[in-house]
Amino acid sequence: YDDVKTHEPLITYKVDVLTGDRAGAGTDAEVFIELYGTTGKSGSRVLDNAQDNFERAKNDSFGIEIADIGPIQRINIGHNNSGFGAAWYLEKVIITHPLLNQSYYFLCGDWLEGNKCQVELVASDSDGNASLPLVTYKIEVVTG
């Protein structure tokens, strides 16, 4: 399937993007995604809305209106590395197919930065934690 489908009725895939809970995790760079299904692909789409997107420990929701490309197998997601502090800690992406009422989970748990500003992720049919939660330690120093 080399070309994006354009002749079929459009449906809206729900895309939830979760930025991780790490210091400096958010980005103001332009974030893009491409969906790959069993019968086609979406083409690269910029993820943007009226909200302040991709901030630390935040879930951002988007709709991508395209022809039905079947169950989602993989995605390519990244950013254009623009602006100050463009590095982004992507926790995971959840895509919901509106006709199949099926969610696909793409776990990342990694920084997208420098010359690694995009990543290809393979679908999982179950949710999970892409990275370990932050833990606060109490350290007591005794000198004598």
Image (tube, rainbow, N blue to C red):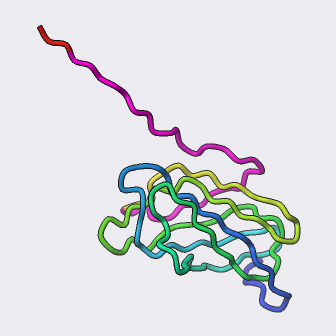
- Kindly identify the residue that appears in the image at 41 percent across and 56 percent down: 25
Residue furthest out toward the left: 144
Range of magenta residues = 114-141
- Kindly identify the residue that appears in the image at 78 percent across and 51 percent down: 125
Residue furthest out toward the bottom: 7
- Which quadrant of the rendered structure holds the C terminus? top left
Instruction: Return the residue nearer the eye: 2 or 136.
Output: 136
- Kindly identify the residue that appears in the image at 87 percent across and 71 percent down: 99
Image-based side of 58 in relation to 42, left or right: left
When asked about the image quadrant of residue 3, the answer is: bottom right
| Residue 132 among magenta residues | yes
Q: Please provide percent x and percent y for residue 37.
A: 77, 68
- Which quadrant of the rendered structure holds the N terminus? bottom right
Secondary structure mostly seen in magenta is: loop
- Kindly identify the residue that appears in the image at 50 percent across and 72 percent down: 31
Q: Please provide percent x and percent y for residue 84.
A: 29, 70
Q: Please provide percent x and percent y for residue 56.
A: 45, 57
Instruction: Please determine whether, in this image, residue 105 is positioned above or below residue 11.
Output: above
Instruction: Return the residue nearer the eye: 38 or 22.
Output: 22
Instruction: Return the residue nearer the eye: 65 or 80.
Output: 65
Image-based side of 13 in relation to 25, left or right: right
Q: Please provide percent x and percent y for residue 110.
A: 49, 51
